[in-house]
Amino acid sequence: MRGSPPFNNVNVGIVCYASVGGSGVVAVELAKCLAARGHDAHVISSEPPFRLREPRPGVWFHRVEAPGYPLFREPQYLLALTNRIVELSRAHQLDIIHAHYAIPHAAAAYLARQILRMSHRTTRLPRTVTTLHGTDVTIVGSDPSYRETLAFCIDQSDGVTAVSESLRADTHRDMAVQREITVIYNFLDCEFYDRRPNAALRARLCPSGTCEKLVVHVSNFRPVKQVDAVVQIFARIRRKVRARLVLVGEGPESPKAAHEIRALNLERDVEMIGEANDVVGVLSIADLFLLPSLQESFGLAALEAMACGVPVVASRVGGLPELIVDGVSGSLHGPRDLDGMAQSAVDILTDAGKHQAMAAAARRMAVERFGADRIVPLYEACYERVLAGISGSS
Ligand code: GMT
């Protein structure tokens, strides 16, 4: 087997989910940034992730097929993914297999490495890195049905990263993971995520005469996002401010949100626009972003809003306090404190000076603390340590 390659051209297999969700977004953005920095990034998923529709030099997509058989009630995705990682490792001499979201990607990476280790056909044995994103630990992964196997696979990774200090602590506490975990915050390309005012879109979503302020929420509408609470907070805001609410995204809680809108008689003030191709366009015309989640290990949607100069009113849970500075770039409250969130929203929306200062702080912090230029080198450093055989990734 060959030794470690020079660090300026690393072949990375990036395993991620293709569905709309922050972990897939981060994985694909990382692939693009790594390719731009001279590496080769092989994205491995069940279908092309939605941020990878356009071809990019240095980024390849590899589909995982999990063929069915009448005997199986469940698709055998873990086996198919493991097999695909083994094939791709051989074909592309992968140096690193980087699993984004531990379930089941950390297990597939572990199994693939074991297979490659035992095979006489292996000429390069890849190292494995697992990035923990949130519910792979906090809600799903720590469930007794998964915990022991998942903790084992995370511990077997050559490097482990988590997207916030909060998630690192949760992983050690709830999963009893022993391995050292490096915190690497999520990031954005802040040249792409920047405010681009669009008067026509603003006039459509917040027509002057009936609307003065635009409040936005973006999520995948799962229970953890409390989308019904978004509507309830907005109802309180609407009593004091001529505002409209735009809900972007869809998911299992979409019917509940629609029901809440009808129940509170807000049909004329709330629009559900479904999944938007141009999230930056919608955020660019927003005055405030609401994220009252029950749990959020990082809150990538809040960072997207901040990068577009939008103050965020959110729950004080998980990694959100590491992202949003209370009173500076937004406001934080307990996840059930809907009155507190509504009051803060009204304060921000009705005080132009405060709004302007928070919007500027949000943008500045997004660029300075969570810009791709700052964060991507931390992943490169993690790869470098792992390739050098340094145990753990710190
Ligand atoms: O929430 C999930 O189950 C999915 C996951 C995802 O793929 O979007 O979300 C988590 O990872 C994101 C990217 O790192 C974070 O921004 C989200 O905060 C995190 N979600 C939760 O912790 C609920």
Image: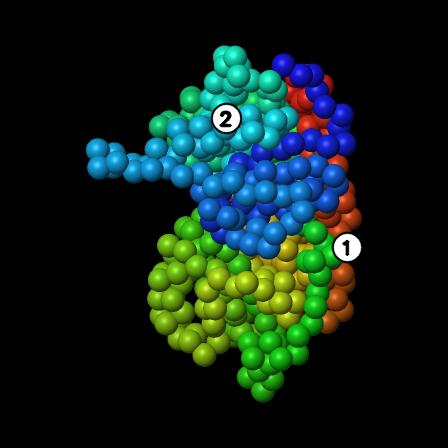
The residue drawn where x is 66% and y is 29% is: 182
Image quadrant in which you'd find residue 169: top right
Mark earlier in primary sequence (1, 2): 2
Return the residue nearer the eye: 63 or 383: 63
Please indicate, yes or no, whether residue 342 appears anywhere in the rendered image. no
Note whether ligand 1 is within 8 Å of mark 1. no
| SS category of the residue bearing label 2 | helix
| SS category of the residue bearing label 1 | helix
Note whether ligand 1 is within 8 Å of mark 2. no
Q: Quadrant of the N terminus?
A: top right
The spot of residue 235 in percent (x, y) is 48, 69
In the rendered view, tell whether residue 200 sits above or below residue 185. Answer: below
The spot of residue 73 in percent (x, y) is 25, 37
Residue position for label 1 = 364
In the rendered view, tell whether residue 259 sits above or below residue 151. Answer: below
Return the residue nearer the eye: 150 or 389: 389
The residue drawn where x is 76% and y is 25% is: 6
Residue position for label 2 = 86
Q: Quadrant of the C terminus?
A: top right
The residue drawn where x is 47% and y is 31% is: 84
The spot of residue 5 in percent (x, y) is 72, 23
Q: Amino acid at mark 1?
A: Arg
